[in-house]
Amino acid sequence: MSDDDDLPPDQNFTTAMSIRWHRLSLREYIGVVTIAMLGVGLITTTLRLRKSETEVARLRSETGYLTETDPGQIAAARAPADQPLTYRVRVRVPSSSPPFRVAYSSVWPKQSPRPQWYGAVAVPPGESLVTVRIHEDPRDRRWKISALVGSPQGTRRMATVLPPEHVGIFRGSHEIISTGVGRETLAVSQTKSIRLLDERWLVGEGSLLLYGDRAPERDQVGIYAELQPDVGPL
């Protein structure tokens, strides 16, 4: 009988495993080390991937993001804005005809099917960032509504002086109904339009009589912008 026979069963098993481990061949050692290195590499890659995905999600939330759409569609999605009375929307238009524009306004006249567009800024093919602002122009101290379209091709802008009564409303504190595009990508056929901004400022008793896109029963002050085919008058 060997000395090992006198040992408890658990200690016998541990001793046997220790002997077996020390008897591993060079090839087995290399295999074990390789598996360990692959495991460490897999964990490191997974952690880096998760960090990259988090960073991409953060950048998308800060700048706005458009998902892939069909070539024959136009698309838009709301982007964050960190300034008061400032609205940003990311848009995409195809390179095929017709060309596109962003029209803007601060009033929807009563009994009218659409806002009274003040002006429009051309939108180049591809992706652009549209910024609409209500602000006081430091050059002439006049309050204006402006539309700016920024793209890799450059920046285009246009501004219109606001009526005094509109300035008073925008500088006050009022409830707002927003029915423009949201953070999710909205895509439609290139023959249609997308209402980018529809921010209706509720002022007075008449502000309670609002029903979606129905023509208002009184002039409705707000911030309106629309991506539309650049064909015909506004």
Image: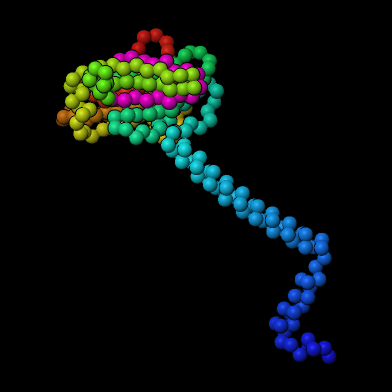
Relative vertical location of residue 38 with respect to residue 136 in this rendering, above or below:
below
> Quick check: can you spot residue 214?
no
Is 29 displayed left or right of 106 in the figure? right
How many numbered marks appear?
0
Q: Is residue 124 magenta?
A: yes
Whole-percent x, y for residue 218 in the image: 20, 22
Q: Residue pushed farthest left?
A: 205
Q: Which residues are magenta?
A: 107-134
Q: Residue pushed farthest front?
A: 139
Relative vertical location of residue 22 with respect to residue 188 in this rendering, above or below:
below
> Quick check: can you spot residue 64?
yes
Whole-percent x, y for residue 37 in the image: 69, 56
For the C terminus, the image quarter is: top left
Relative vertical location of residue 183 with respect to residue 189 in this rendering, above or below:
below
Residue positioned 71% across, 83% down in the render: 11
Is 34 displayed left or right of 93 in the figure? right
Q: Quadrant of residue 135?
A: top left
Residue positioned 69% across, 54% down in the render: 38
Whole-percent x, y for residue 200 in the image: 27, 28
Is 205 displayed left or right of 49 in the figure? left
Out of 112 and 82, give the one closest to the viewer: 82
Whole-percent x, y for residue 194 in the image: 40, 23
Q: Is residue 77 magenta?
A: no
Residue positioned 36% across, 33% down in the render: 81
